[in-house]
Amino acid sequence: MEVLGIDVGGTGIKSAIVETTTGELLCKRHRVATPHPATPKALAGTLCGVLKYHRWEGPVGMGFPAAIQRGVVRTAANIDKSFIDLPISDYFSEKTGNPCFVANDADVAGLAEMRFGAGKDNSGVVLIVTIGTGLGTALFSDGHLLPNTELGHIMLSNGKEAERYASETVRVTKDLNWEDWGERLNLYLRTMENLFWPDLIVLGGGVSEKLDKFSPMLTTQAPVVAASFLNRAGVVGAALFAEESLCRMK
Ligand code: BGC
């Protein structure tokens, strides 16, 4: 099935038409800036532009940086607070005139990695961590997702909230070198390991392309690998989520 996948981030909105049976992108990935402030209305306007750019009519899958419970936004760590309690899937469906299916960005990236990427055929506990403006997490057991884990907000033993200590934004704004930032990420991953004992840890987000630079700092027992889709996982996974949602409705 062809679905328009959209990955909404704090700074950019990436999109592409995805063939869900293979996870392939059927066009070049398109990127536009996230509007500021990113209110529901402003974002709806940007999304209409994205659909127009792709000349798209049909199902739309969207990864969004918040806990989303059955289509309703529940948290707003790095997005406008006016999203809280918005029935986001219905809202964007109405505004764009196309069926939109919205879920947590890390969860959908995880769907892509589990179906076609680094977690494929993994029958254990897999933790996916997406590293960007925030830290997103997706937790799978035998291929089943426990949605909205929000483990980037956990408090570390140093009293700091994980995503304010080890995200990509922190690395860039504090101008940390790979070694120092790698140590921060290691504290986070070790904390996750002590709580969930994953068999595999998959890192997503642009920084996963640089894994060789900070992997010497990582001391978890579980192997840590880069997401196969690198920073395309969000777009592909968003499309997979829409497809799954449509199948459930049948
Ligand atoms: C949000 C999560 C999101 C993550 C990555 C966090 O601040 O609370 O919902 O998955 O950022 O974007």
Image (tube, helix red, strand yellow):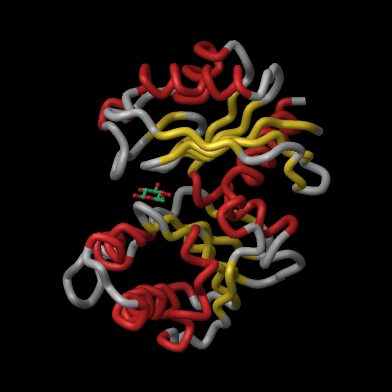
In the image, 66: left or right of 201? left
Quadrant the C terminus occupies: top right
Q: Quadrant of residue 3?
A: top right
**Most foreground residue, 64 or 71:** 64
**Residue 113 horizontal/vertical position (percent):** 66, 58
Which percent across, then down, holds residue 55? 68, 18
Residue at the spot 70% in from the left edge and 17% down from the top edge:
57
Q: Quadrant of residue 51?
A: top right
On-image quarter of the N terminus: top right
Q: Residue placed at 50% from the left, 78% from the top?
A: 197
Residue 87, percent across and down?
Answer: 44, 23
Front residue of 196/179: it is 179
Left or right of 26 on screen, residue 241: left
- Asked whether residue 66 appears in the rendered view, the answer is no
Q: Is residue 40 left or right of residue 175?
A: right
Residue 82 at what x, y percent from top left?
A: 28, 26
Q: Is residue 30 visible?
A: yes
Quarter holding residue 9: top left
State the residue at coordinates (74%, 57%).
116
